[in-house]
Image: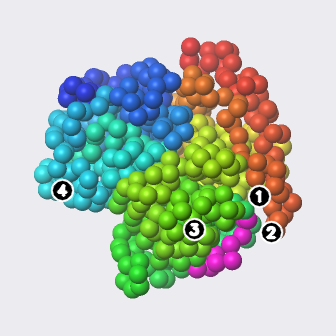
C-alpha cells in the first residue's frame, strides 16, 4: 500500500497482549484514515450502549495517510472512543510530533481494549511493541511522565500521556503528547485512565511510502509557494498572534462569550488578545511537524503570583478561562492553561464548567459552603486554584470534574450549562453566527467548532463570505463543512491550513487540493464525487453510532439561553439562534428522517448496511 501504513496494532490490556494485523485496503479507501478508521472500528467492535469507563470500551489512536509526510501540517491523529462526558462517540484531535512518529514507525493505528490489572505504558520501537510497567509513573504530571519515559526508552521517542486528571477519571481529562499538544475534548484521558494505561511512547525513523513522490513534492511546493505569496513575504498572522488573534474580531461581531454566555462582548477584551499575549509573555512561536504556520505559543510568566512557563494559551483556552469566566488577568489565564496541560484537562470544558459554577453562585443557587470560598465572575485566583482541585478531585473539584451539565443538574438548573450533548461550546456565541448554532447542535461529539467551523465563511470570509445572521442557507453550509472537516481529520492534516489553502468554493465547498495530495500519496485516484462521499460516509457512520447509543433529535439541542434569550447589544442585538427552523431542513439535506436517523436509502448509498 502507498500512503497508508500496513500495520494495525491490537493491544489487549486485560491479557497484556500485543498483536498486529494488516490494514484492510477497502476500509482504508472507504474511510481514508484517522477519524474515519476510528468510527468504522467502533461500529464493528463496540456495543454503543456500553459504559465508557468500563473495560468493554475500546480506544483507537489512528493517523491519516498524510500524517508524517511533507504535506503542509501533516501532523495530526485522532483518538476515537465512547465519551464518558457525553455518552456519544468522540474523536479527539492532536498534532505535534507524536502522530508523525507513529506513522514513521510503520503503524497506521493502535486499538486498545480491556483494562490492565496494574498501570502500564505501551512502547513502540520502529514497529515492535511491548507493554511495560508504569506503577512508578502513576501520579505524575504529563510533563514528568513524558520526561521519565524518554529516559527509559529513547530521547528520540515521542510520548502521549495522561496526568492526574486522567488517572482520577475526570470526565473531561485530556491526553497530552509532546508535552503540550492536547487531544482534549470529551474525556479521552479518562478512558485511558480507566484502562490503567499511563502513556504510549513511539520511536519511528522510517518514511510514509508515496505512490507518486515526485508529483507529491511538486504539489507540496506549489501549495507552499501560494501560501507564502498570500502572506506577501510576511510571517502568517497566526505565527505572530496565534489563534487568539481572532479575539478582537469576535468582540467586534458581539459574539465573544462572556460570563457564561450571558453577554457577547467583554469589557476587558483588550487585555487578553493575541497581541497582548505576544507582547507580554511570548518567547517564540512553535510549529507542529511539517507546519508552515507556527501558531503554537511558547510563553513564560516571570513576575507576579502566577509565574510559570509552557505553551499556550490558544484562543479557545483564553475565551473559556478568560471572558467566559469574566477574567481579564492574562497571567492567571495563562497559568490556568499551564496547569490544564500538566495535569491533563480540557481547557474548554474546564472554563465552561467554572463559568457555570460562577453563575450558579451569583444567582444564589450554589452555596459558598459547597465551594469553600466565594466564586464570582472575574475571580482570577479562584480559576487557577479550582483547576488544580478539579484534576485531583479535591473539595469542590469533585463536582467540577463532572462537567457543567452534571454540575447544573446537581443544583436543579440544567439550563445554565452551556452545552450540547453535555459538551461545552467553543468560543463563538451562535446567536450572532447562525451556522455555528446548527453545527454545535448536530456535531457527533457534542458541541464542537472543529466538526464544522462555519465561522470561516460567516466571520472570516473564507473561502467565500456568508451573512452570519442568515439562517436559511445554513443547513446546506453546515452539511458541506461537516463532510469536509471529516475528510481533513481522516487525512491527517490541520484544519487551520487546509480550509484556507486546500478547499475551493464552487457550487458546494470542495476540497480538491486535499484530494490531489491524497491521490499523489496513495495512488487511490479518487474523483471529487467519490472523495466527498468518504466524508459523508464518516459523518453518517458517527451518526449511526449515536443512534445505536440512544442519541437522536432529542439531543440535537442548544440551551434555552441561546434559542430564547436575544443578545442585548452589539451587531447581533435582538438575535437568537434559529435552531428549530434550521434543524428539519438540515435533516432533509442529510437524507435523515425527522428524528435525525439516516434513512435506509442513505445508509445503502454509503455502504453502511
Residue 353 sits inside the magenta stretch: no
Of circles 3 and 4, which is in front?
A: 3
Residue 542 screen position, x and y as percent = 55, 30
Image quarter hosting the N terminus: top left
465 or 20: nearer the eye? Answer: 20
Task: Please tell me the numbered disc located at residue 432.
Answer: 1
Of circles 2 and 3, which is in front?
A: 3
Q: Residue at x 82, y 65 (%)?
A: 568
- Sequence-wise, which precedes: disc 3 or disc 4? 4
Task: Please tell me the numbered disc located at residue 570.
Answer: 2
Q: How far apart are marks 3 and 4 (CA)?
A: 37 Å
Residue 269 screen position, x and y as percent = 64, 75
Task: Please tell me the numbered disc located at residue 602.
Answer: none
**Could you say whether the residue bearing mark 4 is in a helix, strand or loop?**
helix
Q: Mark 4 points at which residue?
A: 148
Q: Mark 3 points at which residue?
A: 375
Residue 274 sits inside the magenta stretch: yes
Residue 507 screen position, x and y as percent = 74, 40
Q: Residue at x 81, y 46 (%)?
A: 578
Q: Residues within 10 Å of mark 3 (few under 14, many from 20)?
A: many
Of circles 1 and 3, which is in front?
A: 3
Q: Distance between the residues labelled 1 and 2?
A: 9 Å
Amino acid at each position: 500500500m502507498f500512503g497508508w501504513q500496513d500495520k494495525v496494532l491490537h493491544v489487549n490490556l486485560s491479557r497484556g497482549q500485543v498483536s498486529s494485523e494488516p490494514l484492510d485496503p477497502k476500509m482504508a479507501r472507504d474511510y481514508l484514515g484517522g477519524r474515519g478508521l476510528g468510527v468504522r472500528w467502533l461500529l464493528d467492535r463496540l456495543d454503543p450502549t456500553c459504559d465508557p469507563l468500563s473495560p468493554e470500551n475500546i480506544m483507537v489512536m489512528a493517523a491519516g495517510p498524510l500524517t508524517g509526510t511533507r504535506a503542509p501540517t501533516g501532523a495530526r491523529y485522532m483518538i476515537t472512543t465512547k465519551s464518558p462526558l457525553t455518552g456519544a462517540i468522540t474523536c479527539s484531535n492532536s498534532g505535534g510530533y507524536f502522530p508523525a512518529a507513529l506513522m514513521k514507525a510503520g503503524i497506521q493505528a493502535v486499538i486498545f481494549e480491556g483494562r490492565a490489572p496494574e498501570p502500564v505504558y505501551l512502547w513502540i520501537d520502529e514497529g515492535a511493541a511491548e507493554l511495560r510497567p508504569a506503577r512508578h509513573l502513576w501520579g505524575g504530571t504529563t510533563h514528568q511522565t513524558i520526561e521519565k519515559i524518554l529516559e527509559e526508552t529513547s530521547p528520540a521517542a515521542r510520548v502521549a500521556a495522561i496526568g492526574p486528571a486522567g488517572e482520577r477519571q475526570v470526565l473531561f481529562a485530556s491526553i497530552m503528547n509532546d508535552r503540550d499538544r492536547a487531544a482534549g475534548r470529551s474525556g479521552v484521558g479518562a478512558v485511558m485512565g480507566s484502562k490503567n494505561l499511563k502513556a504510549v511512547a513511539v520511536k519511528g525513523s522510517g518514511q510514509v511510502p508515496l505512490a507518486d513522490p515526485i508529483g507529491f513534492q511538486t504539489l507540496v511546493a506549489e501549495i507552499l509557494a501560494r501560501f507564502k505569496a498570500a502572506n506577501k513575504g510576511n510571517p502568517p498572522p497566526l505565527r505572530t498572534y496565534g489563534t487568539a488573534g481572532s479575539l478582537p474580531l469576535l468582540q467586534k461581531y458581539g459574539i465573544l462569550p462572556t460570563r457564561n454566555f450571558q453577554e457577547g462582548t467583554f469589557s476587558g477584551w483588550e487585555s487578553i488578545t493575541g497581541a497582548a499575549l505576544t507582547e507580554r509573555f511570548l518567547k517564540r512561536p512553535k510549529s507542529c511537524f511539517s507546519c508552515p504556520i507556527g501558531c503554537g505559543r511558547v510563553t513564560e510568566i516571570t513576575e507576579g503570583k502566577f509565574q510559570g512557563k509552557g505553551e499556550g494559551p490558544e484562543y479557545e483556552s483564553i475565551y473559556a478561562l478568560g471572558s467566559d469566566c469574566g477574567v481579564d488577568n492574562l497571567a492567571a489565564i495563562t497559568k490556568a492553561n499551564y496547569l490544564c496541560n500538566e495535569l491533563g484537562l480540557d481547557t474548554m470544558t474546564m472554563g465552561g464548567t467554572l463559568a457555570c459554577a460562577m453563575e450558579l453562585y451569583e444567582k444564589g443557587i450554589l452555596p459558598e459552603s459547597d465551594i469553600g470560598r466565594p466564586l464570582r465572575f472575574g475571580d482570577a485566583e479562584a480559576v487557577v486554584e479550582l483547576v488544580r482541585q478539579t484534576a485531583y478531585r479535591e473539595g469542590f473539584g469533585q463536582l467540577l470534574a463532572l462537567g457543567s451539565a452534571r454540575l447544573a443538574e446537581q443544583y436543579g438548573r440544567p439550563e445554565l450549562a452551556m452545552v450540547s450533548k453535555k459538551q461545552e461550546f467553543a468560543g463563538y456565541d451562535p446567536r450572532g453566527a447562525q451556522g455555528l448554532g446548527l453545527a454545535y447542535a448536530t456535531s457527533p461529539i457534542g458541541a464542537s467548532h472543529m466538526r464544522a467551523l462555519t465561522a470561516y465563511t460567516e466571520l472570516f470570509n473564507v473561502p467565500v463570505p456568508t451573512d452570519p445572521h442568515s439562517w436559511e442557507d445554513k443547513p446546506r453550509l453546515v452539511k458541506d463543512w461537516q463532510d469536509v472537516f471529516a475528510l481533513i481529520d481522516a487525512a491527517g492534516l490541520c484544519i487551520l491550513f487546509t480550509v484556507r489553502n486546500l478547499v475551493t468554493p464552487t457550487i458546494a465547498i470542495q476540497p480538491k487540493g486535499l484530494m490531489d495530495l491524497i491521490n499523489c500519496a496513495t495512488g487511490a485516484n479518487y474523483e471529487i464525487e467519490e472523495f466527498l462521499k468518504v466524508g459523508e460516509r464518516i459523518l453518517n457512520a458517527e451518526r449511526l453510532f449515536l443512534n445505536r447509543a440512544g442519541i437522536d433529535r432529542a439531543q440535537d439541542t442548544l440551551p434555552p439561553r441561546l434559542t430564547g434569550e436575544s443578545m442585548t447589544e452589539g451587531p447581533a442585538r435582538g438575535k437568537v439562534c434559529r435552531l428549530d427552523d434550521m434543524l428539519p431542513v438540515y435533516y432533509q439535506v442529510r437524507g435523515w428522517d425527522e428524528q435525525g436517523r439516516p434513512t435506509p436509502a442513505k445508509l445503502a448509498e454509503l455502504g453502511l448496511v
